[in-house]
Each structure stands twice: as C-alpha cells, then as structure tokens.
Amino acid sequence: MGYDERFGQQPRVGEDDSLHDECGVFGVWAPNRDVARITYFGLHALQHRGQESAGIAVGNGETVRVRKDRGLVSQVFTDADLTAMAGKCAIGHVRYGTAGGRGFDAAQPHFSLIDDVTIALAHNGTLVNTDGVRSELEELGVPFRSNTDSEVACELIGYFTKKSGHLRVGIRHAMQMVEGGYAMVLLRENALYAFRDPNGIRPLVIGALGTEGWVVASETCALDIVGATYVRDVRPGEIVRISDGGILSEQGIAPQPEAQCIFEDVYFSRPDTVIRGRSIYSMRYEMGRQLAREAPVDADLVIGVPDSGMPPAEGYAAQTGIPFGEGLIKNRYVARTFIQPTQEMREMGVRMKLNALSDNVAGRRIVMVDDSIVRGTTSKQIVRMLKEAGATEVHVRINCPEVRWPCFYGIDTDVQKQLISANKSAEEVCEYIGADSLAFLSLEGLRRCVPECGYCDACYTGRYPVTIPERFSAGKFLDGFTPEFPYDDGSRPGEKDAIANMELDAPAD
Ligand code: SF4
C-alpha cells in the first residue's frame, strides 16, 4: 500500500508553490458517439491515479467546452452535465494534488484562447523547467490563472501556435522547450492530439473504437471499460493527431533513451492494465515470487496489504508454499489516504481504511507483503495493528527496492529527508516499523519481473534520465546524495533559446 506515506510536502519549482501530479489522462475522437460519456467512464477507470479533481473538455466542431471541479469523477459530473456536452471529440483528466493545489484553477483540463480558437490540455507528469518558461511568458504578456506546470505548457503551446498559425507547430516547439516527464492530451474544436515526453517516462496508449473512432489513455484499463482495443503506445517524443483526416503521427522531438517509470509496474498502474503485452498483475505476482527467492522466511500465513500488495503476496505464497490469506480488510468507501494533507490526517486515514482480520492472524507468524515503504508511518501502524490482532510475528516483505531518492517526473514523493530509507538502514527501518524482519526486492530482481525496455528507476538509484535544474531540486537532496544524469548531453534545462527568439518551422503537412 504505502499510499499515505508516499505523498507529503509539495515539491517546489524554484521558489513557488507549483503543483506536481500523479494524474490520469484520457481522450477520444468519435464523431458519432457520446464522447462526454465515453470520457466519463474512461476517467472512472483511471480514478486510482488521482482523486483530487476531475475534468472533461468536449470539442463540438465549433468550440471547446470545459467542465471541471474538485472531487471524484462521480462527484463532478451529473447525467445532465454529460448530456449537455455533446461533441465529436473530448479529453479528460483526473488529478492528484496536495495542500496549495486544491483550487478550481489547478483542476484540468486547462484551456487557453488562441485568437478565436480554444484549446484544452490535460497533463500527467511534471515539467522541471517551467519556472523560467513561465517568467518569459509573463514578460511576453501571457496571463496565468494557477501555479501549475501544466498551465505553463498550455500557454506555451498557445504562444507558439499564435506565432506560427499552426497548432502542431505550437506543440512541437513547446515539446522542444519543456523538460521532464509528460503524457498530454490536447483538444481543439475538431481534433484531438496526444504527445509524450522524449524519454517516454509517463505512459500513454492508443486504442481503436472499432471503425468509429480512437481513444488515448494513461492505461489500457481505460480502453477496456469503453470497449476500445489496444493499438499501440504513443511513442516517446511523438505527436499523434486525430481528426476528420484520420490519425496522423509525427515526431515532435527526437526520442531519447527510453526511461519508462518502473513505479507504474510496482504500484501506480491498475493490475488489469497491460504494458508491453504483460498485465501489471502478472508482473507483481512475479515480483512476489522473486522476493520469496531472495528473502524467504519461516511463517504460517502470507498476507498482502490491499490493493497493490495482493498480487505479490500471492506470488510470495506460491513460491514458498506458505498459505495465502486475507489479513487486512479494506474499507473500500474511504478515499485513498494519500489525498489527505497532514500527518495526523494520514494516520487517521490508515485506521479508517484498514483493519486486521484477527480470525486469520491471531496466533500466527505472518508475512506481510507491501509495494513500498516511503515514510514508514503506514507500515508501522499496520504492523502494530496485526500484532494487536494477535499475530505472533510480522515479517515485512516489499516488492521493490528501498525508495531513497525523490521523483521529479510526476510523482509527489517527499523531499529526500522524509524518505525513511534515505535516512535509515534496512535494519533501522525494521526496528522503526516494529517488524520481526524486513526485506526489499533487489533492483536486479525487480528488473527480471518486468518487460525488457529502458526504465527510469531513479527513486531507487538516483540515476535520473532528465537533468533536474538546481532551482527545481534546491533543498530536495540530503547532504552526501549526489544525483546522476547519465543521459545529460550538456544542453541542460533552462539553457534553451529564449521563447521570443525561437525560429518556428513550417508545419509538417
Ligand atoms: S523517479 Fe521513480 S517514480 Fe519517478 S519516474 Fe522515475 S521510477 Fe518513476
């Protein structure tokens, strides 16, 4: 689980309170279908990626209409809202944010007026150099409604589009200007665009609605729910445009060494999502088996911490022959605890959400499998809960390595000093959480359980695929921790041409 541990104080972009999201995006182009309802259900499938706010924008051939607000998808939209949003294409967004980023203006899609054309943008990820970009845009007279990096991207696209007269040129030049991890969907009145960062850090897939249209989404589970068939991933650096003219692809920016977020496989994505032909469930099950090979223990029952700890717990049990059973019951009607901003609220959230099943755990030696330990507070509470319910021993097994480095590409991990494994050895963490033993899956072991491709694993290794400007990371690293940027070719973020001086290419068609 670890949801509540992973997210705390907001990272800052330079000196402002910019927002950083783990979000879900969805888009559909299907002129003869109810695109607003398709988007609604797509967002439902992606709700695990963000519960703070939800929004849908619809293009009806003449203009773009946006409805968004704080809350779950089911709270933001009524049946009447969806009925009123008829159109031929749509995008949607679910957002995770913390204190300081809960206002309406931080909700997405963002929209921008380019002369008489409205565009709407939905973004999953974090841009690491938008502080400078924003200042430049402000100097050029562009107004902002929020502090989000996503709005900076939206306005940057708008600026270049206005200057060139072509939206695709606007997107392409914005991609060349911004740095970080992003998967974005953009809408105008008659077309849908989807594009992805050049390392492919954040996920984005394309699906077909038979012959009726196309869908793009953060995860394949959102294709399934709307009856779409997976076609392929949006490629790193690619721009996909879907309109009456069909589906077109162009390279917005040259691809860089692939660095797909490995935490998607460990924790973020839904178990029924498929990445590179393999379900997340099967990967997590394998992680459990590998964990059992690396860190076996004599015990009576293997339990998982719901939900993402369940598949690796099953794998651990299968590998060891120790019975698998339920040891923790989850209240499914409590919102995921990581949306709660204070430590006190988080701790209350754990108690509201989980309870030990004493019938199963009393008098038994328990192996408790979970997906990560970030601050350690949740693990500590769960171990205590199990012992109070009568467990004689609690052995904690984590299906990924120690999280020791902050993430700058769309995940709200804490500053490094709040990551327990950056500050304590595994033995000290074990003592802190009150477990009888603790083991983490090795990085080599984790890589054996996921498809072969280029991954970002910076939160375990400190090897970051995209260079982080010092202004962005100021105060985030502990003394003695020096991040590595193995793909840095010397053109560091923030050293781009000035926005006003950029020469714009002709459109690709
Ligand atoms: S640092 Fe970690 S969470 Fe962030 S993109 Fe890389 S693997 Fe994912």
Image (tube, rainbow, N blue to C red):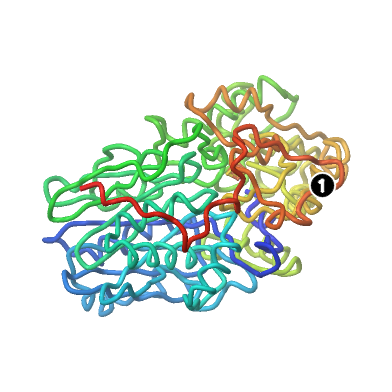
Observer-nearest of 324 and 127: 127
| Count of picture labels | 1
Q: Could you say which quadrant of the image residue 39 lies in?
A: bottom left
Q: Position of residue 494 (x, y in %)?
A: 60, 53
Give whichever of 285, 237 is nearer the camera: 237
Residue at 22% x, 45% y: name it. 248
The percent position of residue 180, horizontal first and vertical second, equals 55, 49
Q: Position of residue 162 (x, y in %)?
A: 33, 68
Left or right: residue 295 versus residue 37 is right
Label 1 Cα crowd, 10 Å radius (few <14 / some 14-19 / many 20+):
many
Looking at this view, is 93 or 117 the one in front? 117
Which residue was labeled with disc 1? Answer: 433
Residue at image point 70% right, 21% down: 294
Residue 442 vs residue 242: left or right?
Answer: right
Q: Does the numbered disc 1 mark a residue whose Cβ is under 8 Å from ligand 1?
A: no
Secondary structure under the numbered disc 1 in the rendered image: helix
Q: Quadrant of ligand 1?
A: top right
Q: Which amino acid type is marked by label 1?
A: Ile
| On screen, residue 161 above or below 278 | below
39 vs 327: above or below: below
- The quadrant in which residue 192 appears is bottom left
Tell me if residue 45 can be seen.
no
Q: In this rendering, does residue 486 appear at all?
A: yes
Q: Is residue 127 left or right of residue 207?
A: right
Q: Please state the horizontal and vertical placement of residue 86, each as a whole percent of the image.
A: 19, 72
89 horizontally vs 428: left or right: left
Q: Residue at x 48, y 24 (%)?
A: 452
